[in-house]
Image: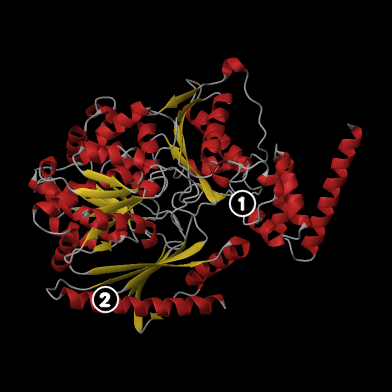
Amino acid sequence: MRDQAASIQREMSDLASQLDQALAAGQLLASSRQNIDLLLRGSASPVAAAAVAELAAAGQWEELNDRFFKTLAFGTGGLRGRTIGRVVTAAESGNGGPNGRPEHPCAGTATMNFFNLSRAVRGMIAYAKRHVGTAREPKLVFAHDTRHFSRDFAEFCAKTAAELGCDALLFDSGRSTPELSFSIREFRADAGVMLTASHNPAHDNGFKAYFNDGAQIVEPHASAIIAEVNALESEIYEPLPAAEQGRVTAIGAEIDRRYMDRLKSLLMRPELLEGPATRVVYTNLPGVGGVIIVPMLRELGFEVITVPEQDIQDGRFPTVESPNPENAPALKMAIDLAVKEGAEIVIGTDPDNDRMGVAVRDSKGGMVLLTGNQIGSLMAWYRVKTAFEIGWLNDATRARALFVKTYVTTELQRAIADRFGIGVVDTLTGFKYIAEKLRKYEDAIPADKKGGDYRSLDEATTRALRLEYSRFFLFGGEESYGYLGCDFVRDKDGNGAAVMFAEVAAYAKSVGKTLAELLDDIFVEFGYHDERGKSLVMEGADGASKIQALAASYSADPPVEVDGSAVATIRDFATQDLFDAEGDALPKEKMLFVDLADGRSFAVRPSGTEPKIKFYLFGKAAPSADLAGSKARVGASLDSLWSAIEADAKRRMA
């Protein structure tokens, strides 16, 4: 035993010497060297040390820098990072795992593994206990999607919560992010976690943190939880005595039923479904969306056809290059099936089913993809129009109704809202900010009017309360394929979006139009709006540094002219004190919004969850019967704008 301990000590000393030499030679970043020590001191697994030693012995300094240049921090989507490295060590491969994955997640402080997971969930538990006080123990809900290690991570989180004195509710198998949000509210839980990396590549995973309102964590809770997490330098913890521990309870079918019943309230004109069934092709790419969407749409009377090869739950996402429904190739199999089966629409959702993409028939019978802005605008237009037709809204109540969208979501929705006389509030990017507004509107209702428990009230009752005492959220969303039409879920909801969009499809069918024709009618009436989402991808430690430098350059050296047009206004969300339409101060965010004198606009911001810097381009034309001409002119102007922005970005990075 003494010889073994001496051998391990020598190996660690040799490793430290190797790392120090690499640091001195400029091969290893100072932050990486520091974080390697942090992991080796705080990891309970021998895999971490073995993986680092393998990579160092092989001279894989770039891989080590990518894994250790930082520690994961909460962004707009919580924690997110690689769980399978670009280089997989023998120690991590082990005996292998399900679906061809390694046995162990990749070692690193900038990656998703049990070291970071333990710190994150224990930080949340500590804050939840402090928030609840001594009256009772906290209750937490845990859900996961189909990604590599998602089930392992969820079980670990639930076990940790129970051993530290909390009651943990753990879904019996993969479920969607919006159902987690709904469940936190239904079970009156104190917090929740979704183990997912949403639409990221298969090698990633993540940790989405939610608070007691069912929304992702925002300030002041976010900073407090981060402080708790950062105070932990080890994944090792001491369980409480058995008598003081909580318990883990499996949940599933019963909460599914409650959620589906509530989703039915999203239908505004159920009678539209009494005619010939609308034929829908659905794919879950292959994630968890089919758990709710398929039986839900069938219950509502839609004819649902699924893509057999994508019905499975498989974290490899073997049939797509990227499980992102905003990318055309991801929906190809579903579109091909729709053509074969004569379906009217295609619906696809990402692995955790919070985003929804669609393809629809055009006037010639072909299938065309819609953008997130177009999908959202169709639903926004239909819901506000129908709200007046069925009496949800009238002249006396319209001033209290509103859309809530992000700043980088199309202004077409503002044009629609203005025509109907309802409000629009813009938020920062990240659905948690839309959810923050929903909490504000709920809290504004007098306590004595809520009957003691707002969450137990039906939709008609809560709608009446919001219209009388607060603001009525009619629809909200973001350009990145996230939508919401209720307040019983506090995150973007692919399930609810599928129900709402399917109703729009049934409406279009009832008036003898395709959805593409319906969208063109909206453009003619409200003006043609076109938006482009562009990005520059820069991965790893070096890429992260370049992204931050490029983002900062726009604040330090803002443009004065772009593509031949003078800059009219600049909103720098990182440095200026800005307020939304309701007068609420906006948190500081690294985003710059530029309005040009010729009516075009663009925004630039580093992604909070992916290794890229994003650019959002906006163009529009006045209402006109010459829609083809408007589309051509606006499209060409945005092509030209992107060329200018891209050239300027390269200059800034030179």
Badge 1 amino acid: Ala
Q: Residue at x 36, y 37 (%)?
A: 179
Question: In 3D space, how far apart are the residues under numbered discs 2 and 1 (Cα atoms)?
Answer: 41 Å
The front one of 355 and 450 is: 355
- Residue type, mark 2 in image: Val
User: Is 193 on the left-hand or right-hand side of 59?
Assistant: left
Nearer to me, 317 or 443: 317
Pointers 2 and 1 in contact (C-beta within 8 Å): no
Give the residue at x 23% y 64%.
366
Q: Which residue is mark 2?
A: 634
Q: Residue 335 sits in which quadrant?
A: bottom left
Bin the neighbour count of mark 1 within 10 Å (Cα to Cα): few under 14, some 14-19, many 20 and up: many
Check the image and report above or below for 485 versus 644.
Answer: above
Q: Is residue 590 above or below residue 109?
A: below
Give the vertical position of 187 relative to 371 (above or below): above
Numbered disc 1: secondary structure: loop
Q: Earlier in the sequence, mark 2 or mark 1?
A: 1
Residue 264, quarter of picture: top left
Position of the N terminus, as image quadrant, is top right
Taking depth in this image into account, of 449 and 375 the one nearest to the observer is 375
Residue 230 position in % (x across, y down): 61, 43
Secondary element under disc 2, as helix, strand or loop, is helix
**Which residue is farthest top?**
243
Label 2 crowd bin: few (<14), some (14–19), many (20+), radius 10 Å: many
Rendered image: mark on residue 351: none
Does residue 582 appear in this view? no
Q: Which residue is mark 1?
A: 110
Identify the residue at image location x=73%, y=40%: 46
Image side of residue 316 versus residue 95, left or right: left
Q: Is residue 498 visible?
A: yes
